[in-house]
Image: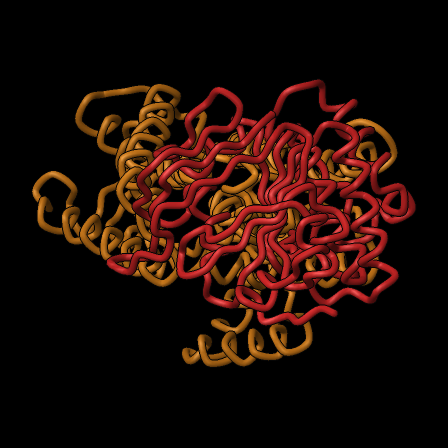
Amino acid sequence: MKGGPGARVLALHLGLIAALFAAQFVLGAYHHTNLARIMVLATYAVGYNLLLGYTGLMSLGHAMFFAAGMYGAGLSIYYLGFGAIPGFALGVACALGLALAFGAFALRTSGVSFLIVTMMFGQAFYLTILYFNQVTFGDQGFILSDRLPAALVDPDVKYNAALLVFAACFLASAFLVRSPFGRILVAIRENEARARLLGYDTYTCKLVVLTLSGGMSGAAGAAYALLFSYVGASFAAILNSIYPLLWTLLGGAGTTLGPVLGTGLMFYLVDFTSGWTSAYLFVVGGALLVLVLFFPLGVMGTVRAKLAPWIP
Amino acid sequence: MRLEISELRAGYGRIEVLRGIDLRVASGSVLGLLGRNGAGKTTLLRAIMGLTGTASGSVRCGDREIIGLAPHRVPACGIAYVPQGRRLFPEMSVEENLRMGLFAGGEGDPASRRAFALDRFPALAARLRTPAGRLSGGQQQMVAMARALATGARVLLLDEPSEGLQPSLVDRILETIGQLRADGVTMLLVEQKVEAALRVADRIAFIEQGRIREHLTPERLARDPSPLERYVGVRRA
């Protein structure tokens, strides 16, 4: 990140992390917890955006990577007595391994076929968790609070741990998309055949980014299990694959800040509307419709197109 | 770097389009390939790049056999394809399009490859930050050729570079092709505009029904233009 635009990009990304760090000192308890949760979910969206926003691959099975991280961490802590950090590392490794194995197969397809394959595998993973409910506790799930270090109950520790995971993935994403490899991903999104004819092994590039995307999703899942002490099959359901898609589209696919903003907006939209009505998804849907009509590129995509073309 | 094609057979599925092509393009020369629509011109370029599924025969670029290579491995042999319609990355700037050629990692250091590409298309220097999709057709053609040169290619496959361009821009492109020939770049030029091909090609090959029917110099065609009428349907005085 050298030169003028690079310095601005670095300042913007570090500025957001600094603002999130500072927010913990001014927010009340309710929003403090919310923001910790948003940062974990935004990590998931950041990973998803690498695949959708920068490579043009839409997935409806990303919940399996989130759940692989969550169950990799949760089961190792619950059954094997792992500590928080080894459990987290195992969760991320599970998601990376699953994404690599899944990608090697699924990336033989493209377009709508890829979308369907991701959905099928995602559902198969979800059903597998339910099938082995004696181990996974299925839909009911299990809690980890009595098996985790006491420090993780402290809201400040939770907040800063969430910030650490988010910042690592967010900065890695920003660095990646500005690197030559990131430009190749954009070339694949715009015209894969042309990228291949320039000499790029597009299959391998897609496999690498899918693995990274799955790994970040897994990091979010593992962090969720550790910081909110709950592991459940609902996180592997298709709805949890649709959420990062919505967050990314709302905030701006193909922008580094978009998924973060989208996650925050959607989280509070659901939070506020669910306080007024049980039909909150109806209100959320209407709000999304308005946003898509007026911001077809997403919020940050529109900002980039009209105000700040240097935003990555 | 020379390009040698022997007994090349290729097609799409069960349909054989190329039925035993033999062609030699000498190092630093331009071979113009003429033929009617459907004769197999574009298929020949696609087959060289490994884009037509099954292909048999031999295509040698320099000393390397490229038949059977995956499409993404062909450019490493020093060959680049500039397809019909340019096929740029429209949302990327001109600079980024060039970088996509530079990252591909051909021979020579990237800075000198970039300088060479921009030296051949100086009009692009003022447009480096412009998204490629917003350029005129002529400028897009320049970007497509510059990006191919940025890969370090010494053999260019040009598919109708004059398509859709106004005459003055066609002249510019043809001048640049002449410069590249002087630089030692080997070119296989597919053209619908017969006059354009005749102006820059060292030799002309006529393709019909997937076979090379004749192979001769522009001077000989000037003396006897009958192959033009026979294979392209163009009558010259």
Q: Is residue A128 left or right of residue B68?
A: left
Residue A173 visible at all:
no
Question: Residue B144: percent from the left, percent from the top?
Answer: 69, 48
The correct choice, above or below, for B142 with respect to A73 in the image is below
User: x, y percentage for residue B218?
Assistant: 69, 49
Q: Residue furthest front?
A: B223
The part of the image, by quadrant, that contains residue B151 is top right
What shade does chain B have?
red
Residue A143 image offset from top left, x and y in percent: 27, 40
**Which residue is nearer to you in this view: A95 or A56?**
A56
Viewed as shown, does residue B151 lie left or right of A228?
right
Please state, as top left, top right, bottom left or bottom right, where the N terminus of chain B lies in the image: top right
Above or below B140: residue A73: above
| Left or right: B128 as drawn, with respect to A203 | right
- Give the answer, above or below, for where B181 lies relative to B175: above
Q: Total marks drawn?
A: 0
Any part of residue B2 in sight = yes
Hey, which quadrant is residue A228 in on the image? top left
Q: Quadrant of residue B171?
A: bottom right
Q: How is the image coloured?
A: by chain
Q: Name the one closer to the observer, A12 or B214.
A: B214
Give whichever of B176, B147 is nearer the camera: B176
Q: Look at the image and tell me in which quarter the C terminus of chain B lies.
A: bottom right
Image point (74%, 35%), residue name: B181
Spot the orange chain and give its letter.
A
Q: Position of residue B61 (x, y in %)?
A: 51, 28
For residue B7, side relative to residue A126 (left or right): right
